[in-house]
Image: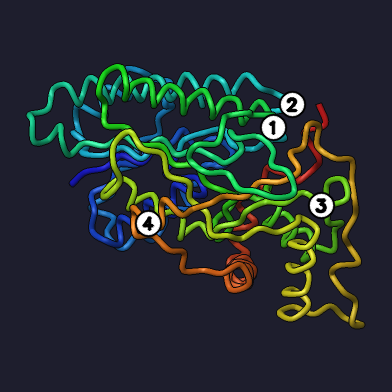
């Protein structure tokens, strides 16, 4: 079985590629290698002979068509995306180009490929649109997103992902393409580019730099370890029902300020500072993100019930393992941040 993973050199995509490769699945990674795409994320695959890498922009119709023709995939995991909300505030256009137009190119290629398959292969083919809980907008202090929640995106990033989700569903309804959509909470774990909260906090703390927290840090996010997410994506493709949406969450709600304090406490334990100083002393509250959603939380009951999926990591265990990974992989961190100064963006 050959599968395509778009964005396979990114954070979540590479976790999925590593998982599938370890199972001796034949994987074709498509990645443009923007600032967040990193070949180091795919180094040391246990079965490199089963992995093919294509440095291709998903907006390149000719290249995508060629890859489909040459590899004849049975499934496509579409994860390639511009993904940082702050960057979308400063420059929305790349998010529309990649997340909307690129998703359309992939859907059209998948449709052409699927139409040329025999009846058995048609029934087996799947196209998975991997999305975010941010498409649903903002929750109040109670309640959860589920598969029937209305779309109310509040950032250019979320709007671009919402558009891609709608396109995927439209291709399923209009053309019969076997499409699934998954929406997930905030991922954390190894190989995450340090513009995101957890790796940024870890690396800044280790260098004695301030730890920026937006507003008062009271925003709530639903956190999931990236390998748990990758397992859910595989189950969605292999056992999910075409046309369905599955929300993937690990019931890991946490205020941003509390998450940062937990990271500081783990660092205090693993790499204590001289003189007994605490890393939490570096926390600095900064101007909040424009239009910042106050709370996200996911009800994963459908995925648990229909896919048989359960997360392996609880937040405490996952965070400690993540901190340890960054401590153990300083060379990766140096290379990943060589052209990134971790300065504040996204003020509009």
Describe the element under mark 1 as helix, strand or loop. helix
Q: State the separation of the CA atoms marked 4 and 3.
A: 31 Å
Q: How crowded is mark 3: few (under 14 residues within 10 Å), some or many (20 or more)?
A: some
Nearer to us of marks 4 and 3 is 4
Q: Name the residue under label 2.
A: 90
Q: Mark 4 points at which residue?
A: 305
- Judge whether 251 appears above or below 116 on screen: below
Q: Residue at x 42, y 44 (%)?
A: 246
Q: In the rendered structure, which disc, 3 or 2, sits on the residue that comes first in sequence?
A: 2
The disc label shown at residue 218, or none? 3
Q: Mark 1 points at which residue?
A: 87
Nearer to us of marks 3 and 2 is 3
- Indicate the position of residue 43 as horizontal and vertical percent values: 42, 56
The quarter holding residue 113 reads: top left
Q: In the rendered structure, which disc, 4 or 3, sits on the residue that comes first in sequence?
A: 3
* Label pair 4/1, CB-CB below 8 angstroms: no
Describe the element under mark 3 as helix, strand or loop. loop
In the image shown, does 289 or 57 lie closer to the viewer? 289
- Indicate the position of residue 31 as horizontal and vertical percent values: 43, 36
């Amino acid at each position: 079985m050959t599968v395509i993973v778009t964005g396979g050199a990114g954070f979540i995509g590479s976790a999925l590629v590593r998982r599938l490769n370890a199972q001796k699945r034949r994987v074709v990674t498509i990645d443009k290698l923007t600032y967040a795409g990193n070949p180091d994320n795919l180094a040391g695959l246990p079965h490199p002979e089963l992995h093919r890498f294509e440095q291709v922009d998903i907006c390149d119709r000719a290249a995508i068509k060629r890859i489909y023709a040459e590899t004849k995939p049975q499934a496509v995991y579409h994860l390639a995306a511009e993904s940082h909300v702050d960057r979308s505030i400063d420059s929305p256009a790349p998010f529309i180009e990649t997340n909307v137009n690129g998703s359309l190119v992939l859907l059209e290629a998948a449709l052409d490929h699927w139409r040329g398959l025999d009846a058995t292969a048609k029934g087996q083919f799947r196209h998975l649109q991997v999305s975010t809980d941010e498409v649903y907008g903002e929750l109040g202090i109670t309640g959860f997103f589920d598969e029937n929640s209305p779309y109310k995106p509040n950032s250019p990033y979320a709007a671009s992902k919402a558009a891609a989700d709608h396109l995927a569903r439209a291709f399923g309804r209009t053309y019969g393409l076997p499409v699934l959509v998954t929406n997930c909470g905030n991922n954390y774990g190894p190989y995450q580019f340090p513009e995101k909260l957890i790796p940024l906090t870890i690396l800044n703390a280790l260098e004695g730099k301030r730890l920026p927290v937006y507003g008062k840090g009271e925003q709530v996010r639903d956190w999931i370890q990236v390998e748990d997410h990758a397992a859910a994506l595989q189950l969605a493709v292999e056992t999910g029902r075409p046309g369905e949406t599955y929300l993937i969450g690990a019931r890991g709600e946490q205020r941003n300020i509390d998450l940062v304090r937990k990271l500081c406490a783990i660092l205090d334990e693993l790499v204590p500072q001289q003189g007994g100083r605490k890393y939490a002393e570096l926390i600095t509250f900064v101007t909040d993100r424009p239009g910042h959603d106050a709370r996200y939380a996911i009800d994963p009951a459908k995925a648990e019930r229909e896919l048989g999926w359960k997360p392996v990591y609880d937040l405490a265990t996952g965070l400690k393992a993540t901190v340890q990974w960054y401590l153990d992989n300083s060379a990766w961190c140096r290379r990943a941040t060589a052209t990134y100064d971790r300065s504040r963006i996204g003020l509009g």
